[in-house]
Every structure is written in C-alpha cells, then in structure tokens.
Image (cartoon, rainbow, N blue to C red):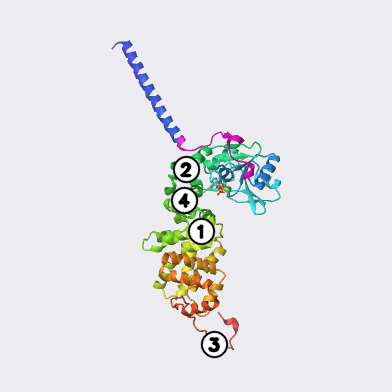
Amino acid sequence: MTYTQLEKNFQKLGLVIIKRVINLCKKVLSKATRKKAAVKTVSGPTVLTRDQHSVSRKYISSSALKVLYRLNSGGYQAYLVGGGVRDIILGLEPKDFDIATNATPEQIKALFRNCRLIGRRFRLAHIVFGREIIEVATFRGHHESAPDKDKQCKKTSKQSEHGMLLRDNIYGSIEEDAERRDFTINALYYSAIDFKVYDFANGIQDINEGKIRLIGDPETRYREDPVRMLRAIRFATKLDMEISKETEAPIRELSSLLENIPAARMFEEFLKMFMSGKAVANFLLLRDYKLFQYFFPALEQLANQESHQYVDDFVMRAMKNTDARINNDQRVTPAFLIAALLWYPLQIQISRLKSETQLAPQDAFFAALSEIMSEQQRSIAIPKRFQAMMKDIWILQEKLERRDGKRAFAAFEHQKFRAGYDFLLIRGEIEGGKVQELATWWTDFQTATAETQVQMIKSAPSSNTGPRRTPRKRRKPKDKTSSTTNET
Ligand code: ATP
Ligand code: MG
C-alpha cells in the first residue's frame, strides 16, 4: 500500500467515524425532543384579542371586576384565571372567580378592607363581598429542591419525602405562574385592561379538543400534589372532556399518594366530587382509576366481596338521588350520601359484633357506629354536624320500624324524620320485601287522617327485632348514711 492509498483510507475512516458521531448525536437529540414534546410546557403566550374570544365582562361577576380594576389602578398586574375564564369560553357559568396578580398577599391586603389572608400551604387573599368570595393569588414561581433540607432558602419550597409540596409560597412571574397551574385549560389569563386572553399552554386548543392535559411532566406534577389526580377526573366529568393519555397514564400507579393528603382536604375534595351534580360519573371514574378507596376504604373493601348484593345498587341509587336533587335545585346534605355509603359497612360491623361478642343489639349498633366512624375519619374528616345527622338517619331506620304505642308519632316528629324516611325509601327500592313494605307504610301514614293513622299503628306488624340495650344492672339502693364523696 502506497503512502497516498494509506492516507485516503485514513480519510475514509475519519469520515465514517465523524458520520457515526453525527448520527449518534442526531439520535440522542431527537429522543430528547420527542420526550419534550410529550410533556406540555409553557411557552410565550398566544394572545387572543377581544374579537377572538368570548370572555365578555357581562359574564364576570361585578365583584371580580372590582378586584381586577382596583389591583390594576394600584399599579399591579391582575388577571382573571382558572375556571372563570375556562368556563366562560365553554359557555358555562363559572362556579367562582379566581384572580392572579403580582401583588403580594400583604400588598393585596393593603388595597382591600374586605380582605383576609388564608392558607399556610398556599397563602392567598380572600376578598369578601357578602356571600361571594373572590380568591386572589400571587403569581407562583419555580421551586428548587433544597440541597440541605434544614436550610430552606428563598427559592426552595417545603417538600415531603414523596415529593409533595408542603408549601407553595414562592412568588414569580406570570409565565412561571402559568407553569405552576395544573391543566392547560386552567392556564388562561384574561386582562381587564386590554380585554385579551393570554393562553400560555395551548389551553384553547385543548378546550376545543376536549382534552384534560397536565402542564409539565405528569408524574412530577402528581407527586407535587396528588389531589391533581382527583382534579383531572373532576374536570373530565364536569366539562365532559377526556383525560389525555399522558395525563392519565401514571394515575393508577401513583394512586396511593392520596394517603398522604390530610383528611380535611380530602373532605373538601369529596364535596366537590360528590355534591355538584356529577356524583355518579365521578364515582365510576374514581373506581376505574382505583382512587375511590381513598375516600371510603370500608365500602370499597365490601364492594369487592361479591357476597353483598345490595352494596353497589344502593350506592348507585343514593348517588343518582343526590345528582337528581342537585340538578333540580333541591336541598342536599353530604350527611345523607355519606350515611348511605357507610350503611352496609355499618351493618356488617354490627353483625360481626353481635356474633363475636355478648353485646345487646343496641350496644352492638353504637359500638359498630363508633368503629366505622373513627376509621372513616382517617380518610375524610367529616365535620361533627354531618356526623350527628348521619347518626340520626341510621338511628331512625330502627325507630321507623318500631311503630307500636306512641312510637310512630315520636318518630314522625323527629327533627330528621324526612331524611330518615327518604333513606328508608331508597333502602326499600333496593332491598324490597319487608323494607319496601315499611317504606310504603310510612308513605301512607304521612298523608292519612288522624283516625286512619291510629288504625295503621294498631294493625302494624309488631317489631321484636329492634335493638335494645343490655339491661342495666339495678343500682343498689343508696346507703343513706354513706358519704357521697366516696362514690366512684
Ligand atoms: P372550579 O372552581 O370550577 O372547581 P377551577 O379551575 O377554578 O375550577 P379552583 O380550585 O377554583 O379550580 O382553582 C383555581 C385555579 O387554581 C385552577 O384553575 C388552577 O389554575 C389553579 N389550581 C387549583 N388547584 C391547583 C392545584 N392543585 N395545582 C395546580 N394548580 C391549581
Ligand atoms: Mg375556581
């Protein structure tokens, strides 16, 4: 081989190596861009002028407009954001109006007399106008993981070991704020200065395509705040949209992160999920994504044991009932639905206690009630007033059965008779037989004349199944000579 041939071969080899390196670089780069494309990020906003969108001031509450104007004239940026913009674009009436601003909570407070600052995890201002509350949040900024857990600097947030944000009070620019929002359709900002809508994450396109899509990497966003899994479901049912593939993909795997959410926040989410006219749809989706168990573990356990034929039907019937009432503008209480959801778990617990202990029926009932309630409280913190009503509804089921003597009238006059009777009606529909007969009896009783009522009571089948307390031991007659201070 001559020297020139050798040189040519080296050149060829060099070219092949360079080509290979270029191809490798191309491959790596395209992989990275593909990964990036799957993650929805925020870029410079698409700006829609007034003639390009349907957000008109006539659809915005006058209180929200007042807040926007006052912040603007105070020299701050302020935008209507979230459900307020999204729902108006969708032709729906917003549930509430949320505002984002570059004013800090203290600066907001200084502008409004009717302002109170709330929240620790997420500090924001509530501007109160009678019954209406306008929520004003300062633009959120990016987080950096603290290198040293004990040294939280200005730009670091407090995170749990699971990556959950325990505090989200780092302020930033509007672009950063948009990136911190949950879904693309919730990152639309309306300005009352230029009447433009600023779309930071292609939210308008997702509204048009009916897609619920998280901003950023779904797994990271769920880890930061697992409640976003519930919000994805809620918006899908509320807006009749579909959760995008990438957004739904990690849900089942990450579902257990909901265990870390405080029970009080879970109760708030329960209300939003089940008391807004979409209980059935939310229930089905929650079940599908294996999330329902974090609201009602005892019920989920029971529903998975096929032996309890009534459970699913009863739960569905109670949810349909709640939805129908809400959609008819009738009054509803979460106590009724929760009482229904826990009714069969309670019955199972009562039977277990009856068979395993010597407790009399009524004692078994109260013991089971307290066990079921304390277990339930660990998942969703039910306020005391609702717990009291649930108890009344359950106790009435027994009272409505025992109608002899004056008992029927006493039950009829019970403060919560209506709820107890409605509950019995649903049980009757599902269980049929004697329960149905009892429900019909009470339906007739309410409209009967006084005379017929007396007749009905006389001919009502007497119930000997009713729970009675274990007879109390008779107290020994007091020894009048002993001192009361010795009593234990
Ligand atoms: P609606 O009020 O109809 O339930 P919404 O979208 O307005 O829907 P809000 O809970 O009022 O929901 O929150 C207002 C906005 O705050 C949301 O649109 C979203 O941009 C942001 N947001 C609320 N919760 C979260 C969260 N957990 N993570 C990120 N952003 C959130
Ligand atoms: Mg809202």
Name the secondary structure under disc 3: loop
Q: Earlier in the sequence, mark 4 or mark 3?
A: 4
* Whether label 4 touches label 1, CB < 8 Å: no
The N terminus sits in image quarter:
top left
Figure disc tally: 4
Q: Earlier in the sequence, mark 4 or mark 1?
A: 4
Name the secondary structure under disc 1: helix
Where 340 sits versus 107, above or below?
below
Residue 169 drawn at (x, y percent): 59, 45
Q: Give the amino acid type for the residue marked by disc 3 in the picture.
A: Pro
Q: Which residue is mark 1?
A: 322
Q: Earlier in the sequence, mark 2 or mark 1?
A: 2
Name the secondary structure under disc 4: helix
Q: Earlier in the sequence, mark 1 or mark 3?
A: 1
In terms of depth relative to the viewer, which is nearer, 258 or 463? 463
Q: Give the amino acid type for the residue marked by disc 2 in the picture.
A: Pro
Instruction: Answer left or right for 190 relative to 294.
Output: right
Q: Which residue is mark 2?
A: 218
In terms of depth relative to the viewer, which is nearer, 280 or 368? 280
Where 314 sits versus 8, above or below?
below
Name the secondary structure under disc 2: helix
Q: Which residue is mark 3?
A: 477
Number of the label disc, if any, that sits on residue 402: none
